[in-house]
Image (cartoon, grey):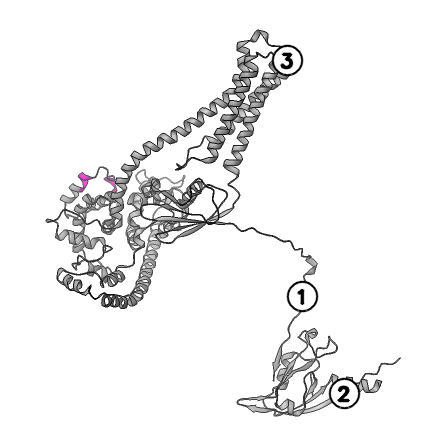
């Protein structure tokens, strides 16, 4: 991931004669690293790209490793004279006050840490990214304990169902076989009708088997917090059916040793028919009933307001929740906490009304808390201007993003002109023939810098590791995609499911609802799917009843005349 | 049997009034060969596409000259107005270099009055 990225950076810097020791440290710390062959193939420009890349790995989850390479990287950054926006250059040298909001650029904090490197070993992990990673770890541990319990109950349910199914399946066979085994001598011979019935029983059982397999034996896609009402109902029904049949069988046939074998066979056939009808009922209840759309669900993400509408049929709240989640992963753009925050200049102005800059001033603000109105008025006045700042900052950001995007697209196009697919007839040196992976690596260098800059501007870099970028490039090359397709994935924030599994965080959803979750959906029901950092608020509305009326239009009735009637005053 | 039709025509002379940069006559016209004749409330024959007076401003030059609402304009300064488009009619009435327009109008009330007096 990010670590492998930084390792490559350091590795590349070696030939240029810059610092070595942090490289060894980093290398030792990380188990896997890219093939040593990789750097040799690249043009020297790649080091530029990697350098840029490494600056923005501030979102690393493991702060330990990054510290050393960040220090190394920041020193290098100071050495280089690059053309950057003036703002960035400024920020890299000023010492920021401790009261500054924590949304500041990561490299800034890196500078601070560099200065205090010897003294402190703690890392400020106040941003949401860091806290999420720690929370994740603790929660995953907790989940593993919980899931032990949950698995038990889930498996219990499955085991019960399987047992019942087996019982139901074997009962007709038992009905047929028991008389044969127990009182064969006394049975009346049963000719062709019986054989016909045997065949029908066999085929019906086969159909039942296939149908049950198709309907029930599927990987559960979710674990529901409560019992699934319809399934429970069906299991109870089957159980009662089988039990009642056994009762009758036991009393009427076993006890009295009925000789009419045909009757017994017909009894068994009727059980199989009843089971088939129960299966039909299961299909209707579990599958068909929810297909016809009855409700519109509106799912709104609390963090940034992204919302979608979905049409569903009659479902219980928990099933609707799972449905929403399935669609969430491919409809909603991925949650990017970095995009939620106001630009730093705006926030710093806003906060400066309340925050303190140094201990000296703290006393004075303590005094001024006795005059809250003055403070609030001052803050309110300042707030009046911040919308202006916000607007300009937004416009500037937009312009920057567009510029970088243009650079990226051009870089990708140019990069793709360097390779072409080997035609069968052409004969080339085996050394020149590359497989997709190598081809990807070869052209990655020329677009890496533009890519990195773009990702940094749109704050997407935590979502795209170098490995994933290379893989995507390989994919595009293998399938002969035009250079237009290649950056599509990065230009817009795609749906969550497109990213790496780590980003899915699929196990952490909690369903919060005022009504019992096995209740059906009704108009006006609201439930919330909570996650650690945001929640999805889902509200229900009934689809309106449409009254369609018919109107017949004769095709010959389309006739037109001039209908002008103007009045002019003279 | 014979059908005798009378059409009484009246000559009206309007002196245009200068209002700022414009010369106004003080009435509104409707109708024309490019218009829908069935919408005309003043015409007896609903296929008549002639130019009719739809409104007369109070105290304006047209009222002073004796033009009445519902009059059909047959001629303006010698130009025929029975087979013109609405815009052509407007242009003929609002020529900038003319201070006086002489209209030939025909009026239904006149016709009705004559018919009634003939029948009684």
Quadrant that contains the C terminus of chain A: bottom right
Q: Secondary structure at mark 3?
A: loop
Q: Position of residue A150 (x, y in %)?
A: 35, 33
Closer to the camera in the image, A475 or A344: A344
Q: Residue furthest right?
A: B1
Mark 3 sits on what residue? A191
User: What label sits on residue B8 in the rendered view?
Assistant: 2
User: In the rendered image, which residue does mark 1 sit on?
Assistant: A560
Q: CA distance from mark 1 to mark 2?
A: 37 Å
Of residue A277 and residue B25, the one placed in the foreground of this image is A277
Badge 1: how crowded within 10 Å, few (<14), some, or many (20+)? few
User: Please, which chain is the residue tagged with disc 3 on?
Assistant: A
Do discs 3 and 2 belong to a common subunit? no
Pointer 1 or 3: first along the chain: 3
> Going by the picture, which residue comes out furthest to the left?
A119
Q: Which residues are magenta?
A: A26-40
Residue A397 painted magenta: no
Q: Could you tell me if residue B1 is visible in this image?
A: yes
Question: What element does badge 1 sit on?
Answer: loop
Q: Are marks 1 and 3 on the same chain?
A: yes
For the residue carrying disc 2, how many other residues have a C-alpha within 10 Å: few (<14), some (14-19), or many (20+)?
few
* The residue positioned farthest toward the top in the image shown: A185
The residue lying at 44 percent from left, 26 percent from top is A162
Whole-number angstrom distance, CA of label 3 to CA of label 2: 115 Å
Q: Nearer the viewer, mark 3 or mark 2?
A: 3
Residue A247 percent coordinates (x, y): 53, 20
Could you say which quadrant of the image residue B39 lies in? bottom right
Residue at 64 percent of width and 15 percent of height: A192
- Report whether A223 appears left or right of B114: left
Chain of the residue where label 2 is placed in the rendered structure: B
């Amino acid at each position: 991931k990010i670590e492998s990225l930084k390792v490559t950076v350091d590795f590349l810097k070696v030939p240029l004669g810059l610092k070595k020791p942090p490289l060894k440290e980093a290398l030792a710390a990380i188990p896997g690293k890219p093939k040593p062959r990789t750097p040799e193939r690249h043009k020297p420009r790649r080091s530029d790209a990697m350098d840029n890349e490494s600056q923005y790995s501030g979102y690393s989850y493991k702060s330990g490793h990054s510290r050393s390479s960040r220090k190394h990287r920041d020193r290098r950054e100071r050495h280089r004279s690059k053309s950057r926006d003036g703002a960035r250059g400024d920020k890299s040298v000023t010492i920021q006050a401790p009261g500054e909001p924590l949304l500041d650029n990561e490299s800034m904090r890196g500078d601070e840490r560099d200065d205090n490197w010897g003294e402190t070993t703690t890392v400020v992990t106040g941003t949401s990214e860091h806290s999420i990673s720690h929370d994740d770890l603790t929660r995953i541990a907790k989940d593993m304990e919980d899931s032990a319990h949950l698995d038990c109950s889930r498996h219990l349910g499955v085991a019960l169902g399987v047992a019942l199914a087996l019982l139901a399946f074997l009962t007709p066979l038992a009905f047929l076989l028991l008389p044969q085994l127990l009182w064969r001598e006394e049975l009346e011979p049963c000719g062709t009708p019986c054989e016909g019935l045997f065949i029908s029983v066999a085929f019906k059982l086969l159909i039942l088997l296939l149908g049950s397999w198709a309907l029930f034996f599927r990987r559960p896609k979710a674990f529901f917090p409560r019992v699934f009402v319809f399934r429970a109902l069906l299991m109870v029904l089957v159980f009662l059916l089988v039990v009642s049949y056994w009762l009758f069988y036991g009393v009427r046939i076993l006890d009295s040793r009925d000789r009419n074998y045909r009757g017994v066979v017909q009894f068994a056939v009727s059980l199989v028919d009843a089971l088939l009808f129960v299966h039909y009922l299961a299909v209707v209840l579990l599958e068909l009933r929810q297909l016809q759309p009855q409700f519109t669900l509106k799912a709104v993400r609390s963090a940034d307001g992204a919302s979608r509408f979905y049409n569903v049929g009659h479902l219980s709240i928990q099933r609707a929740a799972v449905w929403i989640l399935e669609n969430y992963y491919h409809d909603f753009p991925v949650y990017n906490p970095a995009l939620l925050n106001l630009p730093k200049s705006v926030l710093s102005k806003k906060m400066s009304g309340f925050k303190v800059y140094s201990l000296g001033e703290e006393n004075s603000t303590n005094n001024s808390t006795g005059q809250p109105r003055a403070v609030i008025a001052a803050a309110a006045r300042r707030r009046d201007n911040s919308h202006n700042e916000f607007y300009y900052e937004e416009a500037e950001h937009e312009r920057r993003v567009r510029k970088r995007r243009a650079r990226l697209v051009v870089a990708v196009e140019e990069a793709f002109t360097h390779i072409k697919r080997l035609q069968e007839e052409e004969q080339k040196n085996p050394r020149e023939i590359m497989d997709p992976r190598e081809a990807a690596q070869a052209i990655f260098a020329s677009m890496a810098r533009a890519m990195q800059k773009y990702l940094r501007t749109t704050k997407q870099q935590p979502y795209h590791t170098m490995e994933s970028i290379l893989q995507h490039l390989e994919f595009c090359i293998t399938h002969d995609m035009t250079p237009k397709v290649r950056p599509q994935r990065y230009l817009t924030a795609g749906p969550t499911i497109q990213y790496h599994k780590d980003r899915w965080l699929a196990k952490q959803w909690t369903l919060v609802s005022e009504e019992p979750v096995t209740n059906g959906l009704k108009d006006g029901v609201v439930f919330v799917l909570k996650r650690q950092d945001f929640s999805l608020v889902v509200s229900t509305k009934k689809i309106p009843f449409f009254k369609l009326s018919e109107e017949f239009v004769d095709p010959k009735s389309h006739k037109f005349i001039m209908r002008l009637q103007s009045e002019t005053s003279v | 049997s014979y059908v005798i039709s009378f059409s009484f025509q009246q000559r009206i002379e309007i002196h245009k009034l200068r209002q700022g940069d414009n010369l106004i006559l003080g009435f509104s016209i409707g109708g024309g060969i490019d218009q829908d004749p069935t919408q005309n409330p003043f015409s007896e024959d609903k296929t008549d596409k002639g130019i009719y007076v739809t409104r007369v401003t109070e105290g304006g030059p047209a009222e002073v000259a004796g033009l009445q609402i519902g009059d059909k304009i047959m001629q303006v300064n010698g130009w025929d107005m029975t087979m013109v488009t609405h815009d052509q009619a407007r242009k003929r009435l609002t020529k900038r270099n003319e201070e006086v327009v002489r209209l030939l109008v025909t009026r239904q009330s006149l016709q009705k009055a004559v018919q009634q007096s003939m029948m009684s």
